[in-house]
Image: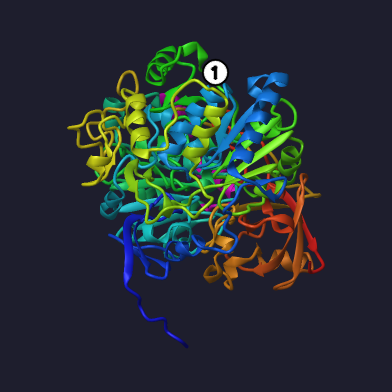
């Protein structure tokens, strides 16, 4: 084997990994031949972080605009897009043009994108793929605590917890560096599969998909029965417990066992482990991506409140955010119903404040649009033109085949991307944009921590930033409002727009971020940030008290039956990220069991269906089907099968999943649907 000799370093940059919301510190180095390498800075990285520089100079990198698949100049592409906007809006109205954003965009891009959509396009139609991520937890946090920050404490606090309950979370594969913060606690893992995380748990509860709410209510029932409640805490710091107590009374352990499949002894063991200790409950997509996701998270929050946990050191409730800027991505304007600072768009005072920063009349700001799934459903009908930034809904959205059909029905699809994703392949116009190592900006990680993203080098010839494209199109449209290409100037404006809001960034500047990071809210330049929320047991509600909210179990929108006898659940694997548009191109992430689609199936279930190890299987729901080779394992329930969702085309599990929505968060029910399986020919 030839070992490449180290060459002199040309330039370095201290930045952060481009993938998940852990946002691990990363040092980039570029040698004199242009090769970029990454190494950890102040912690660890998973293999996705180590290999991320491979995409910077990948041969499939886009470096010129495409119009109908053919290379054109930037002037031609932008003039064409501006002409299409004008023509479509003249015929169909302002709201006929929409924007679908992403949870990986920097705060500066998110802020300017929301402003650009509402002022330059004059449209109410903007939402983003983060609707598929934390929206159910956000809905529950807002109604229970009055504020939505995924982790209301630093991740380091997890190291001092006695017990950590992971509900529908598999960080050993999805964000491995987080596991070093969990090693000193007793782990309770709640997951239909025995995952890599569950292997490390003191107790693994294996409920049927879609039954986590009943499980939480059952644990509360036991806590009441066994005298585990903190009555002083409940009396001093909460409202609404009496109604929740009455609801929990109906969830006696034997009844919960029938719903969930978790044994009565295991229910008692879990409640006993949590009681009287520094306990943290962390939910993730497994419990949230349901048509009752908000209520499910609320049930877990109720349990933490009854045990007297939120606000105490190394205790309480938190959500493990998925996407790199999943937190900041919904705080500053690309969510359909929100304005910067986590202000609500239907609040007159919020509209007035933001309009003053933007220099426009509040009446010119459109009202609330619709959620991500609903926006995609409108494509080709009410919405005639769509911009897609930092997202690949053809793979990542539920009912993926129908999403592709809806995008094909548009008069015009415009994709901002740096590789030819499955969504970009359908676009009339593709605009090549910068990658993370080529841009400055800020991200907000899973702790609400605002961090700097620093560029290593400039963009390749022919590539521009999303900010530059927005400015150029706004100029062609003679749009109101000012649009900058300077991330620092945009961040300063974002601070003014967020001032006084729930997510207040007004006290943060690029200069301050040179010295340290800050967890919001940071309401003034001399404020040190808010590492721990609720530390004085004051919640962000009108009376300062947390709210118990009674919630009842209800079955998944689609239950198993004779025709579709199994549940399908989906999730992530170690080597892939989101729709896989980036990670599937990285050669060093290939060649592993995780680099291709598979179906995890219990051996007993496989025998009943005439399926052996490695056999190809067709998985069919009432919406669509996909194929995958079988991987037999006793680590999954016999009534459930599992596939990752990172793969396109005939292997796309999201072709089968349900797009029924939670009534509050508008989160689709990715995590459970009824399917049938049958042997299939190898593709």
Q: Using residue 450 as the reference point, say whether residue 295 is left or right of it.
A: right
Residue 429 spot, x, y in % from top left: 66, 42
Q: Can see residue 268?
A: no
Query: Which residue is at 34% across, 34% downward?
Result: 489
Q: Is residue 527 magenta?
A: no
Q: Is residue 626 above or below residue 200?
A: above
Q: Is residue 248 magenta?
A: yes
Closer to us: 278 or 471: 471
- The answer to which image quadrant residue 206 occupies is bottom right
Q: Is residue 94 above or below residue 77?
A: above
Residue 10 spot, x, y in % from top left: 33, 66
Q: Quadrant of the C terminus?
A: bottom right
Query: Which residue is at 53% across, 28% downward?
Result: 474
Q: Is residue 437 above or below residue 146?
A: below
The magenta stretch is 242-263
Closer to us: 342 or 558: 342
Q: Using residue 628 as the reference point, say whether residue 472 is left or right of it.
A: left
Closer to us: 52 or 145: 52
| Residue highlighted by disc 1 | 367
Q: Main secondary structure of the magenta part?
A: helix
Residue 338 spot, x, y in % from top left: 47, 26
Residue 462 spot, x, y in % from top left: 54, 50
- The answer to which image quadrant residue 650 occupies is bottom right
Closer to us: 210 or 221: 210
Q: Using residue 397 as the reference point, say whether residue 538 is left or right of it.
A: left
Crowdedness near tag 1: few (<14), some (14–19) or many (≥20) residues, C-alpha within 10 Å:
some
Query: Which residue is at 66% across, 60% downward?
Result: 638
Picture colour scheme = rainbow
The secondary element bearing badge 1 is classed as loop
Q: Can see residue 24?
A: yes
């Amino acid at each position: 084997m030839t070992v490449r000799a180290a060459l002199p370093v040309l330039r370095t940059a201290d930045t952060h990994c481009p993938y998940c919301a852990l946002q691990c510190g990363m040092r980039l180095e570029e040698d004199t031949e242009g090769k970029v390498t990454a190494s950890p800075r102040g912690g660890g990285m998973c293999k996705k972080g180590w290999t991320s520089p491979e995409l910077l100079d990948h041969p499939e990198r886009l470096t010129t605009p495409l119009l109908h698949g053919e290379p054109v100049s930037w002037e031609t592409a932008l003039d064409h897009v501006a002409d299409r906007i004008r023509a479509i809006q003249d015929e169909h109205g302002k709201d006929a043009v929409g924007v679908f954003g992403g949870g990986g965009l920097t705060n500066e891009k998110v802020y300017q994108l929301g402003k650009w959509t509402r002022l330059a396009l004059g449209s109410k139609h903007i939402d983003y793929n983060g609707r598929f991520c934390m929206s159910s937890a956000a809905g529950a946090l807002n109604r229970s605590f009055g504020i939505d920050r995924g982790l209301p404490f630093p991740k380091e606090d997890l190291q001092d917890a006695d017990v950590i309950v992971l509900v529908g979370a598999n960080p050993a594969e999805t964000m491995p560096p987080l596991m070093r913060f969990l090693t000193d606690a007793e782990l309770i893992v709640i997951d239909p599969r025995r995952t890599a995380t569950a292997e490390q748990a003191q107790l693994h509860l294996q409920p049927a998909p879609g039954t986590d709410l009943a499980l939480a209510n059952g644990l509360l029932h036991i806590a009441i029965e066994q005298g585990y409640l903190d009555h002083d805490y409940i009396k001093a710091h909460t409202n609404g417990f009496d109604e929740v107590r009455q609801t929990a009374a109906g969830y006696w352990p034997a009844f919960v066992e029938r719903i969930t499949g978790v044994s009565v002894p295991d229910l008692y063991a879990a409640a006993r482990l949590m009681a009287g200790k520094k306990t943290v409950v962390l939910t993730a997509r497994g419990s949230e991506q349901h048509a009752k996701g908000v209520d499910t998270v609320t049930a877990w929050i109720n349990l933490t409140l009854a045990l007297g946990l939120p606000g105490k050191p190394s205790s309480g409730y938190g959500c493990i955010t998925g996407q790199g800027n999943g937190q900041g991505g919904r705080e500053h304007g690309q969510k359909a119903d929100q304005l910067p600072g986590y202000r609500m768009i239907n609040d007159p005072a919020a509209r007035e404040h933001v309009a003053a920063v933007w220099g426009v009349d509040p009446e010119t700001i459109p009202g609330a649009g619709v959620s991500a799934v609903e926006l995609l459903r409108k494509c080709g009908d009410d919405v005639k033109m769509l911009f897609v930034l930092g997202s690949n809904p053809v793979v990542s959205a539920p009912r993926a085949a129908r999403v592709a059909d809806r995008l094909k029905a548009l008069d015009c699809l415009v994709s901002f991307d740096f590789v030819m994703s499955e969504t970009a392949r359908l676009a009339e116009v593709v605009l090549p944009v910068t990658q993370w190592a080529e841009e400055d900006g800020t991200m907000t990680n899973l702790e609400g921590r605002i961090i700097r993203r620093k560029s290593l080098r400039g963009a390749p010839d022919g590539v521009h930033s999303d900010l530059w494209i927005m400015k150029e199109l706004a100029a062609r449209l003679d749009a109101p409002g000012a649009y900058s290409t300077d991330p620092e100037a945009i961040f300063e404006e974002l601070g003014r727009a967020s001032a006084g809001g729930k997510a207040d960034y007004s006290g943060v500047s690029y200069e301050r971020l040179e010295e340290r990071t800050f967890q919001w809210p940071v309401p003034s330049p001399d404020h040190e940030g808010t590492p721990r929320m609720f530390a004085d047991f004051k919640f962000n509600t009108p009376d300062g008290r947390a709210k118990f909210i009674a919630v009842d179990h209800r079955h998944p929108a689609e239950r198993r039956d004779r025709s579709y006898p199994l549940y399908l659940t989906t999730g992530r694997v170690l080597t892939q990220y989101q729709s896989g548009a980036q990670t599937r191109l990285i050669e060093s992430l290939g060649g592993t069991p995780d680099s291709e689609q598979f179906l995890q199936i219990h051996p007993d279930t496989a025998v009943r269906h005439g399926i052996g190890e490695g056999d190809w299987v067709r998985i069919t729901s009432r919406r669509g089907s996909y194929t995958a080779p079988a991987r037999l394992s006793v680590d999954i329930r016999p009534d459930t099968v599992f596939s990752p969702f990172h793969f396109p085309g005939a292997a796309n599990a999201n072709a089968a999943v349900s797009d029924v929505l939670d009534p509050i968060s508008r989160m689709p029910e990715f995590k459970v649907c009824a399917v049938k399986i049958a042997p299939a020919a190898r593709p």
